[in-house]
């Protein structure tokens, strides 16, 4: 596909990298000449210097003939105007990043009335991930597939874990309804084999139905329910999280250093205790009894502060921490110091856009992408694909299918029935198939076959 991207911030750079790797023709529009030149030297893309909301600049970038136009600058208004112009010029699909809560409340209306195909709000996506994680206290992250029938949870192997030293063959015998899709160690993600053993400090991603996951949770121990949450930082993500918990029974306290923001939040959420103060001040945190909370959400605008906050909370005995880390370069550091759950708005927003790009580019092929999860700071992905009759391995036993290396068929959902496949199982037309792959470039089911 011919794709034009406006904005070379963190998300723009991630989109350039990922979409160029997938073979799309990328044209980047960026106002900063130095940044543009750096990205042109780094990725296989072309570029246009200028403001993406200007008609002349879009003309130079051939927006009138592009398949997709994506605006991800830091300014919502620029993204919206750019997409409206691109739509009028003839771009087939337009995508805008929208971050302002007031705009986000009317995404569907704005999208239809302005002719924008997709609006993505990274902060709202982040809040949804926080909300899901709070529902599963034992999990470091949670992702749902098959209309909520199946969940993938990220868990930590500790020194007291009953699965420590167990290999995956024994794990499957003990938990036949679960499959371990990914193991992450020292920020390196691998698709494990049956002989792979669980080691202290590993993060492992398990797929299964809720009833089967609950048994694993019970064996692992830890929190069964999060009843209290301390939030540090009252930005957009915090506001969305509070909105999602309006009817919750959880005790929630928020610390914010900006008086205007603190007053606004206190007025908008009267059931939430809002404290005006520096949430990075350890004395204040102790004064607010941080050690009495089940979970800390570190959501300040500074990644380093969030990492240190979570480390301090853990040292004070807080059992769960969720940390916002926006810069990819800091993820290995956060991982190495034992930070538990990390949310990365840039990655979540980029994933939503990449999922949309793939679904559009492969709408007429052997499958369509229904869901996509990208493991942070890794090429490993989990895709939910709908199998069409044009898939070249329909009704062939999986053991006889010539899949590429690094591909795992993790689950098959057939008529609402969950199948953890063996070599004798087949993929049939109409199945929903969960595929784990470390290629990061396959865009439909046939793409996982060798030679495709």
Image (cartoon, rainbow, N blue to C red):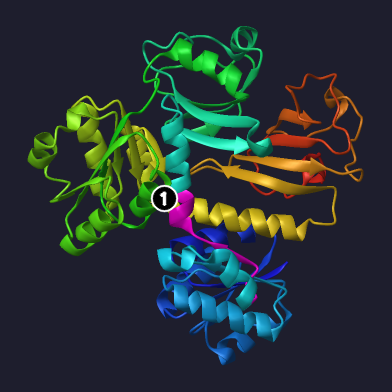
List the single residue furthest toward the bottom.
56
Residue 276 point in image, percent of width and height: 14, 52
State whether residue 62 appears in this view.
no
Asked whether 123 falls inside the magenta stretch, the response is yes
Q: Is residue 368 left or right of residue 373?
A: right
Q: Quadrant of residue 427?
A: top right
Residue 281 point in image, percent of width and height: 11, 44
> Toward the viewer: 227 or 429?
227
Q: Is residue 28 left or right of residue 274?
A: right
- Helix, strand or loop at disc 1? helix
At label 1, counting other C-alpha atoms closer than 10 Å, the crowd grade (few under 14, some 14-19, many 20 or more) is some
> Toward the viewer: 391 or 107?
107
The residue wearing badge 1 is 328
Residue 204 point in image, percent of width and height: 51, 25
Quarter placement of the N terminus: bottom right
> Toward the viewer: 137 or 71?
137
Which residues fall within the magenta stretch? 115-126
Q: Residue at x 35, y 54 (%)?
A: 239
Q: Residue at x 38, y 47 (%)?
A: 241
The relative height of residue 269 versus residue 316 in the rendered view (above or below) is below
Q: Residue at x 57, y 52 (%)?
A: 351
């Amino acid at each position: 596909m011919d794709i034009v991207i406006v904005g070379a911030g963190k998300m723009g750079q991630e989109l350039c990298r990922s979409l160029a790797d997938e073979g799309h023709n990328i044209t980047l529009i960026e106002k900063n000449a130095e940044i543009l030149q750096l990205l042109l030297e780094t990725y296989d893309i072309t570029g246009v210097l200028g403001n993406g909301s200007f008609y002349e600049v879009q003309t130079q970038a051939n927006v009138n003939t592009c398949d997709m136009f994506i605006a991800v600058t830091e300014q919502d208004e620029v993204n919206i105007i750019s997409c409206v112009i691109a739509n009028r010029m003839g771009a087939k699909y337009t995508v805008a990043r929208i971050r302002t809560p007031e705009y986000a409340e009317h995404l569907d209306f704005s999208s239809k009335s302005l002719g924008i195909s997709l609006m993505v709000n990274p902060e709202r996506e982040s809040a949804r991930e926080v909300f899901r994680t709070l529902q599963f206290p034992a999990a470091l992250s949670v992702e749902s597939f098959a209309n909520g029938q199946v969940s993938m949870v990220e868990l930590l192997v500790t020194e007291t874990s009953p699965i420590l030293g167990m290999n995956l063959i024994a794990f499957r015998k003990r938990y036949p309804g679960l499959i371990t899709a990914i193991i992450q160690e020292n920020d390196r993600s691998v698709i494990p084999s049956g002989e792979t053993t669980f080691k202290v400090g590993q993060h492992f991603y398990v797929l299964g139905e809720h009833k089967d996951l609950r048994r694993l949770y019970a064996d692992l121990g830890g929190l069964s329910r999060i009843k209290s949450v301390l939030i540090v930082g009252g930005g957009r993500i915090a506001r969305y999280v509070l909105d999602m918990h309006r009817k919750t029974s959880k005790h929630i306290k928020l610390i914010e250093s900006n008086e205007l923001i603190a007053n606004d939040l206190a007025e908008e959420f009267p059931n939430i205790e809002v404290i005006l103060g520096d949430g990075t001040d350890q004395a204040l945190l102790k004064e607010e009894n941080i050690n009495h909370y089940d979970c800390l959400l570190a959501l300040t605008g500074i990644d380093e502060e969030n990492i240190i906050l979570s480390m301090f909370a853990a040292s004070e005995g807080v059992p769960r921490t969720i940390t916002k880390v926006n810069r990819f370069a800091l993820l290995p550091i956060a991982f190495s110091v034992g930070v538990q759950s990390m949310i990365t708005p840039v990655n979540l927003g980029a994933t939503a856009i990449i999922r949309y790009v793939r679904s559009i580019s492969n709408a007429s092929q052997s499958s369509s992408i229904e869901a996509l999860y990208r493991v942070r700071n890794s090429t490993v992905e989990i895709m939910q694909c709908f199998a069409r009759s044009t898939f070249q391995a329909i009704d062939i036993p999986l053991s006889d299918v010539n899949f590429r290396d690094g591909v795992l068929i993790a689950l098959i959902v057939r008529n609402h029935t969950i199948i953890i496949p063996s070599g004798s199982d087949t993929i049939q037309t109409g199945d929903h198939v969960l595929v784990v792959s470390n290629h990061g470039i396959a865009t439909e089911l046939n793409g996982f076959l060798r030679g495709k």
